[in-house]
Amino acid sequence: MKFHKEGYASLILVLVFSAIITFIAHYFFPTFAIAHWFAYLLSAFLIITILQFFRNPTREHTKSENLLIAPADGKVVVIEETTEHEYFKGPRLQVSIFMSPVNVHINRYPISGIVSFFKYHPGKFLAAWEPKSSTDNERTTIVVKHKNGTEVLFRQIAGALARRIVWYCKEGDVAEQCGEMGFIKFGSRVDLFLPVGTKLNVKIGDVVKGAQTVLGEI
């Protein structure tokens, strides 16, 4: 188990805060054991929360040119045919994965190929399970073109708690299946838009793991 690089700033802030409240507890309340224990417990809770949120577990990746691999940990909350207006401007099969604060929040490429489109959209911070979060929230849009010509669009979508989306890609980059594409902090959602008729291996309510679970076939 490793600690993800995106968590270092948050960990430093929590450590500084913990040191301050522990100092306050001992300096201003030297005889109150309750104040000391409160500072210890709060510090431990915050540190453990940051460590688990930014964990980067070692995993065996599932890779195949013909398979679509989950780009994130979480629960499948949407599977439906819809119209994708930004890039394809036509019908697509949408699959959405909701990431709770306890999930690993690393985002990965579901297929290999070339990043043919990228755009960042500032926006709102509606709850990630709200239908309008796909179009109104802060988000990124990434399209990867497979060598057989199939294009898969996926979006990182900020939630009510997720106030920072991180991405490591730009147009023209080579995308390696299961390679890290980005990170979303503190609860979020990833939407995928696939060709209509894509054969899926998951259903609504299934729990998936990034870089491991097979979502479907290309």
Image (tube, rainbow, N blue to C red):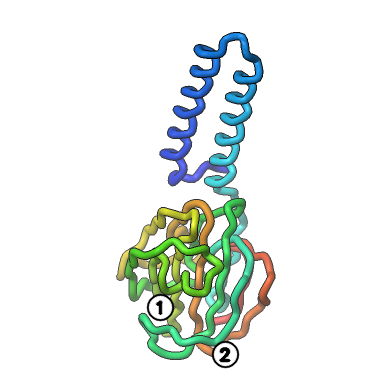
Q: Position of residue 174 (x, y in %)?
A: 37, 67
Q: Which mark is residue 145?
A: 1
Q: Amino acid at mark 2?
A: Gly
Is residue 74 something that shows in the picture?
yes
Q: Residue at x 38, y 88 (%)?
A: 89
Q: Residue at x 31, y 69 (%)?
A: 171
Q: Position of residue 3 (x, y in %)?
A: 52, 42
Q: Position of residue 91 (x, y in %)?
A: 47, 90
Quarter of the image where the N terminus is located: top right
Quarter of the image where the C terminus is located: bottom right
Q: Residue at x 47, y 73 (%)?
A: 132
Q: Residue at x 37, y 58 (%)?
A: 168
Q: Earlier in the sequence, mark 1 or mark 2?
A: 1
Q: Amino acid at mark 1?
A: Lys
Q: Which mark is residue 36?
A: none
Q: Secondary structure at mark 2?
A: loop
Question: How many residues crowd around disc 2 within 10 Å: few (fewer than 14), some, or many (20 or more)?
Answer: few
| Distance from the alpha carbon under mark 1 to that under mark 2 | 18 Å
Mark nearer the viewer, 1 or 2: 2
Foreground residue among 206 and 40:
40
Foreground residue among 82 and 208:
82
Foreground residue among 187 and 54:
187
Residue at image mark 2: 197
Question: How many residues crowd around disc 1 within 10 Å: few (fewer than 14), some, or many (20 or more)?
Answer: some
Determine which quarter of the picture holds residue 62: bottom right
Q: Position of residue 116 (x, y in %)?
A: 34, 75
Determine which quarter of the picture holds residue 114: bottom left
Q: Secondary structure at mark 1?
A: strand
